[in-house]
Structures are given as structure tokens and as C-alpha cells.
Image (cartoon, rainbow, N blue to C red):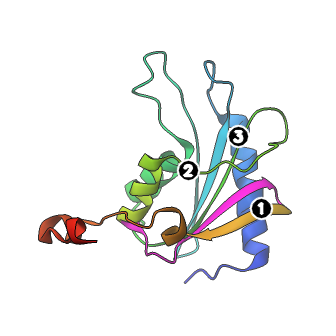
Amino acid sequence: MAKLTEKKEKELAAKALDMRKMAYVPFSGHPVGAALLAKDGRVFTGCNVENSSYSPTICAERTAFVKAVSEGAREFEAIAIAGGFGEVPETYCAPCGVCRQVMVEFCGRDFKVILAKTPDDYKVYDLEEIMPLGFKIEDVKSGTYAER
């Protein structure tokens, strides 16, 4: 069972920053990297990959989740996200709504979302803070999402 420590937060932030270098962003010029910590200790990375027709573009966070799920991981502890223009991001890069909903699908409300500018300059949020009304499959099946 992976335990999120300050050291692990910094490691994840550094991996997310490194993954920005792998991004394919000829249209926006906005590279994003992600590092996803599974509860079993494995780390899955991702970067954003743009496409000229835009719809097939995939975010770094979803890339990391798809890689993890395709390798059998289903329980997650935290994700670090780093994105922005230039060599070093000037702002924190929050996940889009689609990525937040993917996180809700696989993670508990206390899942940690780390927004990083550098390995030492980052903010940590609970998933509940950034996606308070996200719904899970049990909400859809029972219809309770409409009652919140």
C-alpha cells in the first residue's frame, strides 16, 4: 500500500514535470505531464497528445489513468499534474472537467491531486475539493446523483 508522504509528493511532481517533455502539442504549445500513484506503489505517467481535429486530443491525466487501468491497477492514491507554457510552468495547471470525472470513476473523494510548478512548489487538493458533485457508477445506477 503506497503512502503519500511529502517526499513522494515531490517525486510525483518531478515525474509530472519530466513528462511535459514528452507532450505532443503542436497546436496549443501547452505541454502537460502527469504522474499517477497507484495504491500498490506503481507510478504511471502520461502526457497530453494533441490532434489537428481536436476531438481525439487526450490529456496527460487520462493518458496516465488509461495506462494504469490497462496494466490492471484500479486503486489510486494521488496524481501530480504539471503544465503550462515555457520551460518552467508559471501557474498551476488544474485538470479539465473530463479528467476530474475520470478521477471520480476510479478514486475516492480523499484522492490527492497535486498541482506542481516545480518539485518544491506545488499545491495538494482532495478530489472532493476540485470535483464536489462528480458521480460514480453507483450514483448513475441508483439515480442518486440527481438528489445531491
Of pointers 3 and 1, the one earlier in the residue sequence? 3
Tell me where residue 107 sits by quadrant.
Answer: bottom left
Residue 109 part of the magenta-drawn span: yes
Amino acid bearing label 1? Tyr
Amino acid bearing label 2? Pro
Residue 113 in the image, given as x and y percentages of width and height: 60, 64
Q: Which residues are magenta?
A: 106-119
From the viewer's perspective, is residue 95 above or below residue 123?
Answer: above
Residue 9 in the image, given as x and y percentages of width and height: 73, 69
Amino acid bearing label 3? Arg
Looking at the rendered image, the quarter that the N terminus falls into is bottom right
From the viewer's perspective, is residue 16 above or below residue 48?
Answer: below
Q: Residues within 10 Å of mark 3 (few under 14, many from 20)?
A: many
From the viewer's perspective, is residue 11 above or below residue 90?
Answer: below
Which residue is label 1 attached to? 122
User: Residue at left 43%, top 75%?
Assistant: 108
Which residue is label 2 attached to? 95
Which residue is label 3 attached to? 20
